Image (spheres, coloured by chain):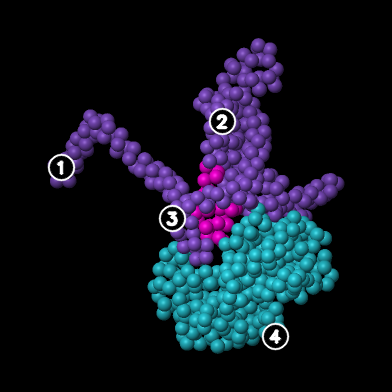
Chain colours: A cyan, B purple
Amino acid sequence: MVSLMANGGGHQYDLVSASGDADLRLIYGGDVRPVNLALIPAWKDLQPFLQSPSFNTIAGKHYGVSFEFGPNVLLYSTKTFKTAPTSWSVIYNKKYAGQITVPDDYIQIADAALYLSKTQPKLGITDPYELTTPQFNATVALLKAQHPLVKKYWDLASQEESLFQSGTTVVGAAWPVAVSTLIADKDAVAETIPKEGATGWADSWLLATNAPDPNCAYKWMEWMTTPQIQAEDAVSYGETPGNKLACPIMDKIQKGSCEGLHANAPASYFQSLYFWKTPLATCDNGKNDCEPIQNWVAAWTQIIG
Amino acid sequence: MSETAIREDRSSKGMARVSAALWRRGWLRATLTLTPPLAWFLVIYLASLVLMLVTAFWSVNPFTNILQHSWTLANFNQLFTSPYPTIILRTVEMAAIVTVTDAVIALPFAYYMARVASPRTRRLLFTAVLLPLWASYLARVYAWIVILQKGGTLSWTTSHLGLGAVNIGYTNTAMWLVFSYIWLPFMIVPLYGALERIPESLLEASGDLGAHAWRTLRLVVLPLVLPGIIAGSIFTFSLTLGDFITPLLVGGSNAQFIGNVIYNNLGTANNLPFAAMLAFVPIVIMTFYLLGARALGAFESL
């Protein structure tokens, strides 16, 4: 997607929908341009933490309009776990060797970093997307130790679904859409957000620098953030809507879906989510000693290779 | 004579003149016939390969993914750093095992088809061998997931036979089975062709000179079908080398193949130059493979 936009895509596309891990690459690559939020009336109804998030807003300039998000939850078999696991430690536990599945994605490193930030405070990890070399190495070591325990690194949510349906795996990291599908299928599974919190993704609509039809693009962003469309999108894809007013409409479409997808959750729930953002060499503390994205990608290839 | 007829007559005279001119100039005829396919070959096949080779020595800005057109050997050097040697070795190993498996299964099968079966049975067997190729590759791989996964067809069958549940879903064994199944027709068909061409008299002569069936097979049949085996193995070996769908769907946590790394470099990492460099690995391996086959005399009887 980043390549599509970089290699001349800006002339071909008006908008790009990207998760936080790609946003900064698009912004610094000059592929997208600031958005005039005065033209997006529903912006003021977005969850407060989605109005100016650091993954699409730089120095007060908004480069995108957030629309939907979701947590990366801990999915487990209720046959194996009588009560919900309280810690992510289960996916690093030898006891479940060969029954664990995690996504095949470099951003998975942040999940391990989040776990270490709570379980090994000595490392001093404050932001799972800003890792100094020692913090990064400790995280990669944890994931390498996890590799022999993993049955499958899943590439498609449907793969994870069949892994749990057949009972091949009993615990793993999952997207809410897989959880909804499995629960609708009456499989013995449940999801939880352990005490360490969870990573999450939040998608934004970004306006291409050379958009051929910017007016059309604004109309689209306006439409996509309306409560009705937000609710429909959330229910059909198992996402949480960014627009706070979508909740009652979600329940009209599918009873209980507002609470099920955490659209009405308290602020403490959203604070336990650490949303994907592009790992940069520049840390928030002003130093230039964080591991940048290309090292994350290379390390991930090593972990699974 | 109407006007149209006159015009037709003239045009047919024109055609006759053109064809006469072409008949007289052989070089012109050859040029006109060969230019379109040659141009196609040069532009579509060779030029794209050359472009890929050039791309392999470029790089991308790791942050913005913009292609940088400056020469670098970084991609080439990266091939020799962990984990790529392991991944390349794993791929070659699987391709070799799959090729041997397919050859071992295909040889007796093709022998029966070519030399023993009645024409009717032969047609039936041919259909049976080719039938899977008419169905979607993806559908067949997904079918194997259902067969091999926990509680799937295989483990259901073995546990009902009292052999205990066999769970080989999402393992390298599963990949080996699926690859061997998928590429088997590509080994049977060339082997059948090679076996069919062996004159019966040679086998009879071997028998008359006192050779047993096994000795005839080893000293007469095998050398004669070697080109067929090599032809088949080029398919099974190179198809396994380049595949990424079977490892992705059927493989477990050690299923990174060359194809998967290329796929990831095109998709997630957006590193086209490194993907291009990786794409040359199977080409180089196949070149050595063919040179080796030639050294063994595989092409002498072609």
Could you say whether the residue bearing mark 1 is in a helix, strand or loop? helix
Is B11 contained in the magenta span?
A: no
Q: Residue at x 61, y 83 (%)?
A: A49
Could you say whether the residue bearing mark 4 is in a helix, strand or loop? loop
Q: Distance between the residues labelled 1 and 2?
A: 63 Å
Near-viewer residue (A22 or B302): A22
User: Would you name the residue on which mark 3 appears?
Assistant: B70
Q: Distance between the residues labelled 3 and 1?
A: 65 Å
Q: Please name the amino acid that badge 1 sits on.
A: Ile
Question: In the rendered structure, the residue with mark 2 lies on which chain?
Answer: B
Does label 3 or label 2 sit earlier along the sequence? 3
Question: In the rendered structure, the residue with mark 4 lies on which chain?
Answer: A
Could you say whether the residue bearing mark 2 is in a helix, strand or loop? helix
> Dot 3: within a 10 Å radius of its alpha carbon, few (fewer than 14), some, or many (20 or more) residues?
few
How far across and how far down the image is residue A286, in percent?
Answer: 58, 75
How far across and how far down the image is residue B85, in percent?
Answer: 62, 47
User: Would you name the residue on which mark 2 appears?
Assistant: B293
State which region is magenta: B260-283
Q: Please name the amino acid that badge 3 sits on.
A: Ser
Q: Are the residues at dot 3 and dot 2 in contact (C-beta closer than 8 Å)?
A: no
Does label 1 or label 2 sit earlier along the sequence? 1
Which mark is on residue B6? 1
Near-viewer residue (A103 or A190): A103
Q: In this view, does B223 lie above or below B89?
A: above
Please state which of the two labelled residues, at mark 1 or mark 2, is closer to the viewer: 2
Co-location on one chain, circles 4 and 2: no
